[in-house]
Amino acid sequence: MTTNSSHPGATVKPRRFFSADSHCVITDAQVKQHLATRFHSAWDAGMARHAAKQDERQAGKRLELEDFVDLEAARHPGYFDPKARLAAMDADGVQCEVMYSEFDFTSKVYEIGESWQVCATAYNDALAEFASIDPQRILITYQLPLIDVDYAVAEVHRLAGLGARSIQIPNFPSEHGMPDYHDPRYEKLWHAFCETGVVVANHLTLKNALWDVFRRDPTPQKGIFTALPGFAIAETLMGYILTGVLERHPKLRVVFVEPGLFWLPGFIRFLDSRMHQHYDFPGVKLLPSEYFRRQMAATFVHEPEAIAARHELGVENVLWSTDFPHPCCNWPNAAAKVEHLFAGVPEDEIEKITWQNGATMYGIA
Amino acid sequence: MALVLDGIRVLDLSSGIAGPMTTMLLADHGADVTRIERPGDDPLRAQLGQHVWNRGKRSAVLDLKNAADKQSFLALVATADVLLESHAPGVTQRLGIDYETLSAINPRLVYCSITGYGRDNPYSTRPGYDALVAARTGLQWEQRGRFGGSAPHLSGQPPLFPDLEVAPERLQGAPREGPLFPASRFPSLGAAYAATTAISAALRAREVTGRGQWVETSLLQGALAAGVLAFAMAEKLDTPMFMSWVGDSRSPKGLFECKDGRWIHAWPPNPRFILSAGAGDTLNATPDLTVRQDPERIGLGVEEIFVLDHYWEPMAQTVKKFTADEWTAAGAIAQVCIQKVRSPEEALVDPLLMADDVVTELADPELGPIRGAGILYKLERSPGAIRGPAPKKGAHTAEVKSEAARAGSATKAASAVGAAASTRGASKPLAKGPLDGITVLDFGLAVAGPYAGQILSDLGARVIKVNALHDWYWHSSQIAMACNRGKQSIAIDLKKPGSKAVIERLLGSADVVMHNMRYRAAIKLGIDYESLKDRFPRIVYCHTRGFERGPRLELPGNDQTGACLAGVEWEDGGCARGGRPIWSLTNMGDTGNGFLAAIAICQALYEREKTGRGQFCETAIVNAQMFNTSYAAARPDGSRIERPLLDAMQTGFSAGVRLYPTRDEWLCLSLVTDAHWHALAKAMGLPELASGGRYATAAARAGADEDVAKLLEHRFATEPAAALFAKLDAAGVPCEISGENASRELWRTPQLIRDGYVAKYQHRIIGEMGQPGLAFHFSDTPSAVQGPPMMVGEHSREILASLGYSEAEAGALFEAGVVGDETVNPTLAKTGAKPVASPWEKK
């Protein structure tokens, strides 16, 4: 037993943690190190267009960084530097982190134009380099645009060859003019994920329609707006389950990252109930809750409701995370916070949620 | 965007190859280069490469024997920063444009001379053409290595394994005895690298001292730089691990013909990968077949020649089952160095090279759109830019003359500034060379990285080689010694926690950090640029790679992969005329990478003298190899534009530029003008070649090249080379004997040793050794070879002391095994001490 400095007197059990969601920054310069010079201007222009669009969406109002991140954690060099990151993880008892780069490249890539493929490849190469410091500890999530499914399939195989464990795809392909995931064109993509064993990641992102809420949100930190993205993921979840994607691809594994576990059990119960009403879901043979348990998982940060929801969602289907360095981030008090959050939970369940589920899903021995 | 040489005005009076190549590199980074060309025809200007090398320059025709033109020229000199000339020794004095004269007009002028052999030695008066310098220096005999090894040959010792016989089809090079004519213009290449390095270093020195100076190099030094791996002389050749199989002409070099008739180069030629991956009906490469995981990988030792020979046949048969592209893809999966041997034209339409600026497209005013070598090194704040195509000769004469007229009135003022400046730096004499006062941390691996460090040492920098404790193994080899002389070595176990503080202090003492490891390895060591730049904003950081940025970036690369991609092996083997590819032992991929890195570093240091800021710089082996084949240009569809092509037997380009067997030795001709031909005709009594004869003109000879060659072959075959040489040389025919033992003469010529062209020194283990010497000379800040190849850990104590460690603190670091001294090497270990095992050593 050790004493945690931030909670004087409290004793905490030393644990090794598996954080299923955390973040790092990849700079333009790092991407350009992997990108042939000719495409640098296309990259810069694309990022500038994305920033301009973002300005337009925000109508001159800013979402300040301090509203988005934990200031202390975000100042840690480990947000940017992989070597320092290992030190930050060590300080928090975190053995492995599933890491997502800031911020949702799969939507930025559409602004690049015709050079998007080489840029996307270089972006993933930069992610691989970040993770290379210790690929057994930094489990980088690669980013996959779906502009061209053949490219996406080839990239899944290439990234699997580089040791990829999970790949993020857009939550709302329709926003980018792509068909939804039930479309036959994606079948070979799901095959590629199944064949390689790479996890499909759907991290909470901002749906375009939500920017209207942002502009109307009068609260100082945009507290109405920032509470909504988790719910939007319901559409993505239903897309996988109710159109038969999971039925057709029983080996496909999908993780939802910080959707908010307080609503998820009730929502899945609601979906189950509709299977007995007048709705038709051709090709769907099991209950949504059964598909969820068989093929899905969801992550949470410091959320007491997640503990309450664990049996309904499945103890094996929930993954603890630090969300370093975002606002509700545990760092650097993971051990104490886990002790507090999991008070009264049987030890084997704590072990599963804070370590084993992630280790199994992401292939850590 | 501002470039590092913005505002630098260069006058290029050179002809030939090395000069234009040098000023191309300067122009690509912002220098304003004006070619000052002679009136009349210059046959060397007609070569295709000039359309690549002269891009982005201006061309003015000035007759320096004409008073008005001379006046214009001197006015230009007054405002110039760099002048480059390639006249034969003595000519500049006759023209009144020698260094003494011009530096009096402009003391800030960096005056660069590229001669054939230097000014003051028995070779100085020999004709300075690439083929002849390659003959005179024995370079043509080093192309495929020597029977029994290069090092024994140069050392005058008996060949190794004299009884080993190898089937001729296993050997690289044309199926005949004797020297090979390389398509690569090695002497000029080496001189171009050396001249650009020297000019860049002199510009840095000028920022410190306020004065320009005379910098010199030569094709002889270029040839020696090209031969840096081949030319190794040692007293105790039998020292364990010193010799390798690489220099033996009988060792297979990993070139194999594939199913589709194309060739691949697998280097080193590890049997396990090829035999395992190619065992079945489909090529089955896996990451498990990496070299590092191969317990039977080919090591450095001479005895490996037997292993290579044993496996040659099954490897050749296995390679033949699949295409070159299939093998290249398989190599990528297993992280094995394999590439397809390509022509320069194929390289010039490679979209990956094009995308990373390594290939560029020029709107040539005479040829139309052409592809040529592009930007070959980059600085963070100077990405390079090509200002335009090569101008027609004299396109800017009027513009330049009127500029000279304007400058003429300002000449006096400029001189006054120069004189004032010349006193400014008097307190900083740069006694060790133009890079005196600069400390370099060399984290380089193999040859391509460390060779850059060796150049910086030759320029007077203090170069600290940061070694692992087990590095003594690699550093015992001739190859490592060829790129690590004059450095200091500290041996550190980077896995030990205590090493971090030592590295941190080293970084604090450094001006330059350089390496060629994969970037992710640098991140792991905490020496990536992102980790250093905020703490050490003055550091110039140089990273070099095998390949361009893009999908090939993470592949393992080496000299050979670059040579394949750029067309070097294709050209040197005469493949376009039916030959087989060859990997020349005087290849300048690794060493060219080292030179380009040194050039980028010198230019970044030059900028730092003005701004106080360091920056990131970069190049790659494939970039150097593209420089090495920059004599080629292609049409945008990849079709060839006429240029000299080497014949399949690797004797030369044409009847006038080739090797001929005589009754005893080989004779090399390099005829350029009709006058040369007519002199040959007269000396040999061949009226067909004389004025008025059948083959009197270039056009007539070109149309009957084989007949002309046969004529000469027949004529030369019956006479001894010495007699032929005497006759032809006296008649003014450019020729040399390509002597089997010519290279030995270089180390026996006192003037060459005196002037540092060749170096000789005592080595603690291998006794007296000889290596190529300085590639450049500086009049005001002369540098010297700083010492023999360092021993791993040899300077650990003095380096720790210089970093402020007390004797007790240093002792603790040795005790804990964080730092080691030279006794990590078992040869130097005290009795009973436990040497550090090398993971590369074969058990």
Image (spheres, rainbow, N blue to C red):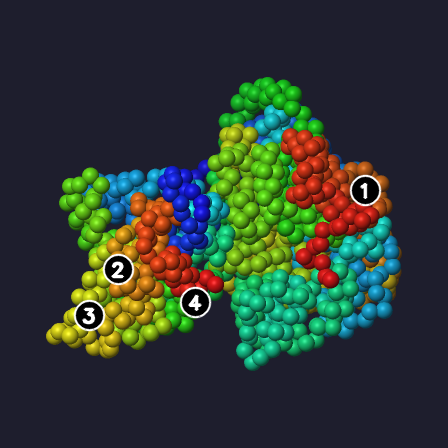
Query: What is the chain letter for disc 3?
Result: A
Instruction: Indicate the position of residue A233 as horizontal and vertical percent values.
Output: 24, 59
Q: Are marks 2 and 1 in contact (CB under 8 Å)?
A: no
Separation of marks 2 and 3 at Cα, in angstroms: 16 Å
Q: Which residue is mark 2?
A: A309
Q: Residue at x 21, y 43 (%)?
A: A222
Of residues B244 and B775, which is closer to you in this image? B244
Q: Which mark is residue B761?
A: 1
Q: Residues within 10 Å of mark 3 (few under 14, many from 20)?
A: some
Badge 3 and badge 1 in a common chain: no
Separation of marks 1 and 4 at Cα, in angstroms: 55 Å
Secondary structure of the residue carrying tag 1 is strand
Q: Which residue is mark 3?
A: A272
Separation of marks 3 and 1 at Cα, in angstroms: 86 Å
Q: Residues within 10 Å of mark 4 (few under 14, many from 20)?
A: some
Instruction: Indicate the position of residue B361 as horizontal and vertical percent values.
Output: 48, 53
Mark found first going from the N terminus, 2 or 3: 3
Q: Is residue B698 left or right of residue A147?
A: right
Q: Which mark is residue A157?
A: 4
Q: Nearer the viewer, mark 3 or mark 4?
A: 3
Query: What is the chain letter for disc 4?
Result: A
Give the residue type at disc 2.
Ala
Give the residue type at disc 1.
Tyr
Separation of marks 3 and 4 at Cα, in angstroms: 35 Å
Badge 3 and badge 4 in a common chain: yes
Mark found first going from the N terminus, 3 or 4: 4
